[in-house]
């Protein structure tokens, strides 16, 4: 299968030099796709919690209204690895039609032929996507862009942290929350830590593993329940890693108790893809929903609701919204380029090292 890459900072730098900083260029072709007579029941599996709440409001419900013949059921998945495992158990009798998951795990699903190519005659929104959001094989394209951030309790951490090194500050011993692999957040932190230690993650992650092992006494949990954002807001945790889009939502809801910072060393981008399950009995309806989810209207709505950067190049965002997404100029300049397809190949090895040397150590 052709090698697939999407999430690098280079293309976003190019994007922002071409498009106005106040938003993304709209085209004359932009508009609401006409309703169709397609009918069917579509089961969408995607992330739980605040993602579900906002995605249902911003995308699922409007798409259901646009296509009244399609009934959309949202099934929650804790993380991409869990969702992939469920798809594997259903290989011969799929119960899911559409899945949203991170690009690295989706690549594994592509390799195992768990996902099917999209029909561009149905998913016409594919023509509006950035080239970097498309799959060369015609499989699931990107549906959102995000990045890792440091979050903190503003009452316990003052002044605001400016570096990832704050995680190792003994002042916060027992108050640090790290979401460990197989979650992609732990993989992203490995890449960042390795870079801070002066190493290339494609050569070795020994420096990162050694440094992360030092975190042991400071970590409250490697598996935050219900989530790190809630634990930081409540004061159970002082510092944590998290995703920008979710952090922006929780920062607003917490009335200032949760702070969000992009550390001076930089961060990494993360891509979620939207995928058609191979063998879906509702393929046409499922692809109609995917087309709606990738449309300018749905992409704009979700960006304004939850601060994910859109993948549809015809979307216009205000400067205020753009500044809080992964596509803001300030963020782009600090991004570390990551080959998530490579990460998918070493993910299990990294997971075992985390379990043996970081968590157990």
Image (cartoon, rainbow, N blue to C red):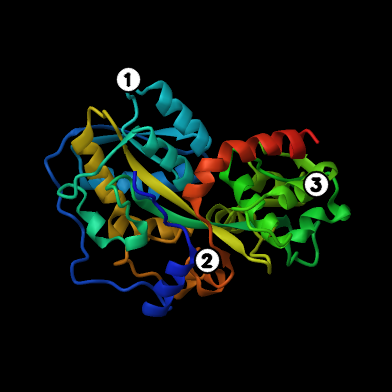
According to the picture, the residue beneath numbered tag 2 turns out to be: 324
Q: Is residue 291 above or below residue 224?
A: below
Residue in the foreground of this view, choosing between 225 and 111:
111
Quadrant into which the N terminus falls: top left
Secondary-structure class at tag 3: loop
Compare marks 1 and 3 and give the one earlier in the sequence. Answer: 1
The quadrant where residue 33 appears: bottom left
Quadrant into which the C terminus falls: top right
Q: Percent x, y for residue 355?
A: 70, 34
Q: Is residue 20 visible?
A: no
Check whether the beta carbons of the residues at disc 2 and disc 1 lie within 8 A of each other: no
Q: Horizontal placement of 278 versus 209: left or right?
A: left
Compare marks 2 and 1 and give the one earlier in the sequence. Answer: 1
According to the picture, the residue beneath numbered tag 3 turns out to be: 215
Tag 3: Cα neighbours inside 10 Å, few (<14), some, or many (≥20)? many
Compare marks 3 and 2 and give the one earlier in the sequence. Answer: 3
Q: Percent x, y for residue 307?
A: 48, 59
The quadrant where residue 309 appears: bottom left
Q: Is residue 276 above or below residue 27?
A: above
Between circles 3 and 2, the one closer to the viewer is 3
Q: Percent x, y for residue 308?
A: 46, 58
Residue drawn where x is 82% and y is 47% of the image: 214
Residue 92: numbered disc: 1
For this orientation, the residue located farthest to the front is: 203
Tag 2: Cα neighbours inside 10 Å, few (<14), some, or many (≥20)? many
Residue in the foreground of this view, choosing between 47 and 169:
169
Q: Horizontal placement of 245 versus 97: left or right?
A: right
């Amino acid at each position: 299968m052709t090698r697939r890459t999407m999430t690098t900072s280079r293309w976003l730098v190019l994007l922002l030099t071409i498009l106005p900083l106040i938003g993304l260029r709209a085209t004359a072709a932009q508009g609401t796709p006409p309703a169709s007579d397609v009918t069917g029941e579509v089961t969408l599996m995607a992330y739980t919690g605040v993602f579900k709440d906002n995605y249902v409001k911003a995308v699922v419900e409007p798409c259901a209204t646009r296509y009244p013949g399609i009934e959309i059921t949202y099934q929650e998945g804790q993380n991409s690895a869990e969702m992939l495992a469920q798809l594997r158990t259903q290989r011969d009798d799929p119960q899911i039609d559409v899945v949203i998951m991170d690009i690295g795990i989706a690549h594994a699903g592509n390799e195992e032929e768990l996902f099917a190519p999209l029909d561009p005659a149905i998913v016409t929104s594919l023509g509006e996507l950035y080239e970097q959001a498309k799959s060369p094989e015609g499989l699931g394209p990107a549906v959102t862009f995000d990045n890792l951030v440091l979050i903190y309790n503003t009452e316990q951490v003052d002044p605001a942290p400016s570096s990832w090194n704050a995680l190792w500050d003994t002042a916060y011993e027992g108050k640090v929350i790290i979401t460990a692999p197989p979650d992609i957040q732990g993989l992203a932190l490995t890449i960042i830590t390795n870079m801070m230690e002066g190493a290339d993650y494609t050569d070795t992650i020994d420096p990162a593993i050694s440094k992360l092992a030092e975190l042991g006494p400071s970590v409250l949990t490697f598996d935050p329940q219900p989530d790190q954002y809630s634990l930081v807001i409540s004061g159970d945790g002082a510092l944590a890693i998290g995703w920008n889009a979710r952090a922006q939502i929780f920062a607003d809801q917490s009335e200032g108790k949760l702070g969000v910072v992009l550390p001076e060393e930089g961060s990494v981008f993360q891509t979620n893809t939207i995928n058609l399950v191979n063998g879906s009995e509702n393929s046409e309806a499922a692809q109609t929903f995917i087309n709606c989810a990738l449309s300018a209207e749905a992409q704009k709505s979700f960006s304004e609701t939850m601060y994910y950067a859109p993948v549809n190049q015809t979307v216009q965002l205000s400067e205020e919204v753009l500044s809080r997404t992964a596509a803001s100029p300030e963020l782009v300049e600090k991004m570390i380029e990551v080959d998530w397809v490579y990460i998918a190949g070493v993910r299990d090895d990294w997971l075992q090292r985390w379990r043996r040397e970081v968590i157990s150590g």
